[in-house]
Image (cartoon, coloured by chain):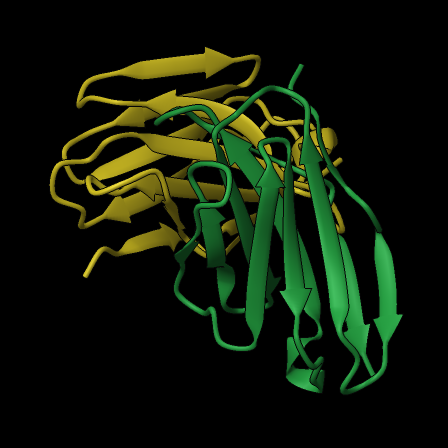
Amino acid sequence: DVKVTQSSRYLVKRTGEKVFLECVQDMDHENMFWYRQDPGLGLRLIYFSYDVKMKEKGDIPEGYSVSREKKERFSLILESASTNQTSMYLCASSLGTGEAFFGQGTRLTVV
Amino acid sequence: EDQVTQSPEALRLQEGESSSLNCSYTVSGLRGLFWYRQDPGKGPEFLFTLYSAGEEKEKERLKATLTKKESFLHITAPKPEDSATYLCAVRIPSGSRLTFGEGTQLTVNP
């Protein structure tokens, strides 16, 4: 079974802090994704990566950056956390054009 | 612009009462339609992939079908444990990303 693991289930951070969300997959998938999920807005793509050191902006990249130094790890960085970044963050990975597998999610609260 | 619309937003059924969820899309050159189940506070769990019109997939009480404009998730004789939000997503022709609908929240009462 594919396993996508996010480093934290719950996080509480202060406004202005730099926040790192980590995601690791164990199936050698080349594609990795970061989404955020908010009530009434569904899942929105922040960034994705199709190879090591490669990244592409999704629909809402402002205020975020990403890092993919190793194939199995994809990090989402909030450069200066703001309250409007309070959300559920979901990491996913996929092989080619196949289905994406998701982690358990990180509920981030920025106060 | 690629669009994925799910209906209804919420559906309440009695145990054993069969029904269908709809996912309509406006993507040219679809490269896959995906169904997921999401329980509260958890990540989406993959259910099915459909690639071409006329294709069907089944798993327990769930059956997914695909036409050129929409997909249906049929739930036969649902049980309370089928209560969840069901998401559909489409893969656009230009790459690997998925575009998601907003989901249907299904509640099955005993």
User: Does residue B11 appear in the picture of this structure?
Assistant: no
Residue at (76% x, 86% y) in the render = A16
Badge count:
0
The N terminus of chain A appears in which quarter of the rendering? top right
Which residue corresponds to the image point at 64% horizontal and 58% vertical from the top-left? A76
**Residue A49 versus residue B10: which sits nearer the camera?**
A49
- A97 and B79: which one is in front? A97
Q: In the picture, residue A13 is in which quadrant?
A: bottom right
The image quarter in which residue B73 lies: top left
The location of residue B50, given as percent across then percent down, is: 32, 23
| Image coordinates for residue A32, horizontal then vertical, percent | 52, 40
Which of the pair B80/B53 is nearer the observer? B53
**Residue B106 sits in which quadrant?**
top right
Q: Relative to B26, is A55 on the left or the right? A: right
User: From what the image shows, is residue A79 above or below residue B108?
Assistant: below
> Relative to A50, is A33 on the left or the right?
right
Chain A appears what colour?
A: green
Left or right of A47 on screen, residue B31:
left
Vertical comparison of A1 with A92: above or below? above
Please tell me whether residue B31 is drawn above or below residue A58 in the rendered image.
above
Image quarter (top left, top right, bottom left or bottom right) of the C terminus of chain A: bottom right
Where is residue A107? Give x, y as percent: 77, 60
Q: Position of residue A58 (x, y in %)?
A: 40, 60
* Chain ID for yellow: B
